[in-house]
Amino acid sequence: MLYLAEVIQKKGGIIGGGKSELKLLACQRSEQSWSAASDEAIQSDEAGRFSPGTLLLVDLTANRQVQRIQEAGRPLVSILQNFSRLQEKFKNQEDEIEQWKQSLTYQSQELNRREMEMETRREQLQQLEEDFEQLEQQRQQVETTRDEVLRQQAELERNRQELEGAWDQLQGQKRQVDERQSELQQASVLDDQQAQTIQALLSRLSSSHFSPESMQEQVNQASELANQHQAILSQHWQNLDQQRQTSQQTQEEIDRQSQDLDRRWQEWHQAQEALEQARAEVKLQQTVLQAKQDYAQMLGLQIQHHDDLRQQLERLAEGIEASVSSVNVEALEKLPLDDLQRAIQEFERDFEMSSRFVNGQEEELESKQKELEELKAKIQQSGESDRNALESELADEQDAYQFLNQTLVGQRRSLKEKEGVLRQHRSVLARREGRSDPGAEGGGTNLNQVLTQIDSLRQQQAEELQKIESELEQIRNRIQETQEMVRDRSSEQEAKRNELKQLEETLKSQRVTTAQLTGKVSLYQEVLQPIQDTVDGLRHQLEAMQGTIAQVNEAKNDQSGAISEMQQIVADLISKPEFATT
């Protein structure tokens, strides 16, 4: 099983040596799951190769035997990076879920809106059906009137045929009277039988009269009925013209409103594009602000790190002096020279190995620092699409840098302690061999130069941090101004959009109403035109019948005059004796 352990060293012996142990800190349960251990200490000879405070990954058997051991710096950095990526992945999934929720809410609202539109259209169709039923009733009334007109027209046609028959009969009788009159003029005498016959014919001709007044009355009634229907039709035609004009005016108004709405939508889209550009500018400024904030935070962390480093160096110097003072010089003075030299050689090997390890870690720390600077330069030069990935990579590298730097703190302290103990042993050996103290020439553990360099670097970073904070304040002001402008314009755009949507719905309703009115006009005209044609034909026939009746009246008057003349002639012939027979 894999454990995270810390190297600890138990001091002992007269020369400050001791055994190294592994303190178990955490245990791996699965690939991405770790749990805290019980701070159990495991004896291990291999732990002596590492400085105290070093974090290691240790693979233990069920019997707590060390199978494999390695430094935990890089694996821990990889684990932390994977953890950061998982957190980012979970955050992205939460954002996607939120977007899905918003999408479902929008779809639900859209379905409700469509249901309302369908309900509105259903009501409009119901209204159309009611209007059609009214038109159907009017059409049926017109059909009834048309049937009545046709019936009266058939009756008039019968009367006309009867009138033509009577006229033909009258013409025949007139011809008979003319023939009799011709015979009388040719005859030299008129007997009683002939006179009686002529009198009977004249009596029958005068009694068989045809009265066109009744026919004229029927024609007048039919004409009056036709005029009434024409008046009704004229009123309907007038209504149809009014509705047609209303439909045309409404359609022209709809076309004008449609053009105005298209123009206003175009202006709204242009303003929306400008607003989106302003929002993109805000996002860009926020990205720059975030990058500079991260940089300022990193500078603050570095300043804090330098302060901590200075304090650690000060404590380290105190620790070195304490460790040197903790060496039993009296015991070293009594120790045989061979044993003292072997102890010094052992300390030198341990110090050399620890020094190589710490120097390697320092080089890696410097490499991390260069990578951070390169990433910062890339962020400053990158575009919007690559900036997020680079910033995420920068955050991971900064975490790795901080973790590696914290790991080196204990190792530096341990190395300085070993250096102080080694220097004390060398001093004792040199004094016993009669040589000068090599540690005295080097000035001991003077750290003033290092502290001066740290103070200088901290001052530079403080000035850079002050400059960055000034830039951040300017960027925040610009972002605030732009955001206020975006909020104001967003409210205006939303209000305009709602207004345009309402106008669009109103225009759509007007188009439906206009379409209904146009359909009613077309249907109205289709119903009225056949009725108008029928009434026009009927009126033409009545006018023709009026002319026929006038001719019949004229013929009747001629017939009455002719009969009176013939009766007078016959009466004269009968009264003259010279025309009578004996």
Image (cartoon, rainbow, N blue to C red):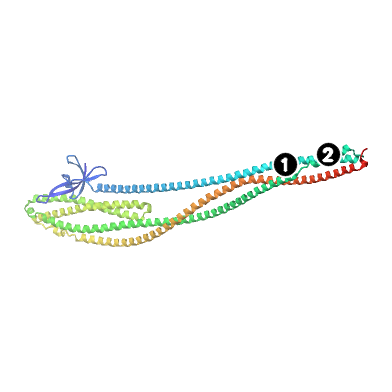
Residue 91 horizontal/vertical position (percent): 32, 49
Mark 2 is surrounded, within 10 Å at the Cα level, by few (under 14), some (14 to 19) or many (20 or more) other residues, namely few
Instruction: Inspect the image, locate mark 1, and give the three-letter code of the amino acid beneath it.
Output: Asn
What's the mark number on residue 507? Answer: none
Image-quadrant location for residue 136: top right
Residue 134 vs 272, above or below: the answer is above
Residue 10 appears left or right of 407: left
Closer to the N terminus: mark 1 or mark 2?
A: 1
The image position of residue 56, as x and y in percent, is: 21, 47
State the residue position of label 2: 200
How many marks overall?
2
Along the line of sight, which residue is nearer the eye, 284 or 74?
284
503 vs 145, left or right, is left
Q: CA distance from mark 1 to mark 2?
A: 29 Å
| Residue bearing the label numbered 1 | 159
* Three-letter residue code for mark 2: Ala
Please state which of residues 515 and 180 is positioned toward the viewer in this rendering. Answer: 180
Q: Is residue 506 visible?
A: yes
Q: Nearer the viewer, mark 1 or mark 2?
A: 2
Q: Residue at x 81, y 45 (%)?
A: 560
